[in-house]
Image: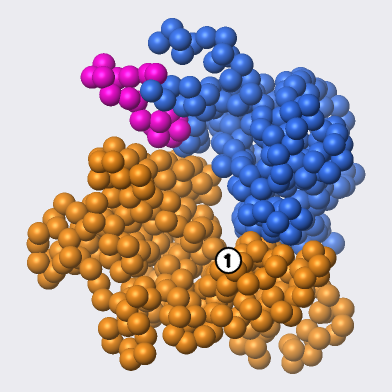
Amino acid sequence: MSELFSIALFWSIIRTSTPLILAALGGMFSERAGVINIALEGMMLAGAFTAAAVTYAAGNPFVGLVAGMAAGVLVALIHAVACISYKADQVVTGTAINILMIGMPAFLSGAFFLSSGSTPQIPKGQLIPWTPIVIAFALVPIAWYVLYKTPFGLRLRAVGENPEAADAAGVSVARMKYAGVLLSGALAGIGGAYLSIGQSSLFTRNMTSGRGFIALAALIFGKWRPVQTLLACLLFGFTEAVSIQMQGVMKLPSGEDIPVQFIQMVPYLLTIIVLAGFIGSSRPPQALGIPYQKER
Amino acid sequence: MIFLRQLLFPLIAVIAAFIVGGILILLIGDNPIEAYRLLLGSALSWPDGIGYTLFYATPLIFTGLAVLVAFRCGLLNIGAEGQLYIAAFATAWVGITFANLTAWILLPLCFVAAILGGGVWGAIPGVLKARFGSHEVINTIMLNFIAVALCSYFTQYHYKLPGDPIMQTTPIGPGAHIARLGKFVPGLPERIPVNVAFLLALLCCLLVYLFLWRTKWGYELRATGTNPSAAEYGGISIRKQIIIAMTISGSLAGMVGINEVLGYRYRYYDGFSDNYGFTGIAVALLGRNHPAGVVVAALLFAVLQRGGIHVDGFSENVTKDIVQVLQGTIILFVAAEAFFSGSLGRFGLLKRAKV
């Protein structure tokens, strides 16, 4: 047991929660503006692939990071145009983007690198293991400040809670929603970039493996608030870190290994429980998921 | 005319997606016409192409119907993926545990396991929504991951042959096998796994149609979907309808287990689903949430899936991933229908169609 709870585990938690924090904070901006974002997974994949491909081509991870962020924004733009301008169903659009982004990176890497869905290995000196971590943790207070202490944040929240009132007060509902969704793409893009050029050294097919959904779960578990969302991400990062570390280490009193699958389930079970209202009430933004039709 | 307009949008969406895909193929320096010829040609060849296309269409019809039933009640079931995993495992469990029973008893038991397994897993988010008001979309996403983890746990720790490097259970009893269509169709070899479950899928389309549009229960379910407050005012219990719709939806998704376990692999194979649950959303949407449309859309996606494998092997730069790109783009265009009605309206096409 003692070898499990150690400095190594601490850093492991920091690493596993970093992409979750980035994507979850991104999702927060989108959902606080009233746009459901189950496309975080797809945005992360776009960021991860683009960051790895550009870093490999340019030889500079910072260029790669910015490119990954831009790719996230581009994917978010699809979501925004479909949901906000053309009033498409937000969940359906999100699903479409997720399917599209499983295929697109693999399709492009097959064409550019003649591989089956992965980018070439990036040399160790061209990775950025620290920058995204710093960005992620620094973003929590910044997101809190922006959301609660700036006119932008007030308008964003107003649009998500009561778009009619915000509109009547002169706020452009569509513009705020666009801002929220594009911000989510930028942050999820950085989160994805961290996976490919921070934690690892190449892009592999479907490398996010559900982290976009865990980030969404953390956002709901954190009740759509920055600090609680950070804590949820750390908790879910902890479960991932433990499930990596404990294989063969932690045993039941009967001497059997604790099945890793049970630990993997924890974030999802907790989210269902908190959403059902068993651990305090978790209330989504009032107008979440409802397209806004301006009265004429 | 209304019928034609119902056809028009899905058709435009598919064509638009193929154009987008074509541009992508051009950009990476390949010939789109050639790639599409490979894609469609291989899927429509006899017997392998058509046989496999029907085999791939089977789970998509089930999941498409599952999404459709929930949709008609105003719910979005994106949990078909989890429901079909639980159902497939339950089917295999019955097939393994009671392997010695004769086919007349074992087969019905396996069918019940598939339907019940999917139904129960679908009912959970239904009950959670009816009882606590929690959103079915989030809960079904979470339940998908839980289902995958559960099935993987039981396979790895309890039902795998010791030492088997593949994550799969021991085989089911021979009494639980269902016949492949090759047994009845001359010229169709039995190695092609399309089986009786395909006919069952078509039967389910008919049953879902009759249920939704020809029975009182179906009427109540659709009334809840179109206008919940009016339905409630008319004496329909919305909570009950939500649970019923999610249970039926889950059962339909669960029948994928019949195709997979009883007709194809004769065991549970971990991670077998090629995003069937999510593609089901595309199938239902493209099929305009109508059982007949679901069959057509499922066949189209099955053609893509089958053809994708061929493109992968014979084209230089284009990989099978183009299929997912096409699928995603089709859903995007179908979802943002206003995009077409807006642009068509601008050219005066739609006004004419209205007359």
Q: As drawn, is A72 to the left or to the right of A236?
A: right
Chain B image colour: orange
- The part of the image, by quadrant, that contains residue A88 is bottom right
Q: Which residues are magenta?
A: A249-266
**Residue A87 position (above or below residue B210):** above
- The part of the image, by quadrant, that contains residue A65 is top right
Residue A6 appears in the rendering: yes
Quadrant of the frame with the C terminus of chain B: bottom right
**Residue A282 position (above or below residue B97):** above
Quadrant of the frame with the N terminus of chain B: bottom right
Identity of the residue drawn at 58% across and 66% down: B282
Residue type of the residue flagged with mark 1: Ala
**Residue A185 position (above or below residue B216):** above
The residue at which mark 1 appears reads as B282
Q: Is residue A26 magenta?
A: no
Where's residue B177, x and y in %? 23, 68
Judged by its main secondary structure, the magenta piece is loop
Identity of the residue drawn at 26% across and 19% down: A255
Q: Nearer the viewer, residue A58 or A292?
A: A58
Residue A283 appears in the rendering: no
Identity of the residue drawn at 32% across and 83% down: B182
Where's residue A163, x and y in %? 77, 46
Q: Chain of mark 1?
A: B
- The part of the image, by quadrant, that contains residue B226 is bottom right
Chain in blue, by letter, is A
Q: Residues within 10 Å of mark 1 (few under 14, many from 20)?
A: many
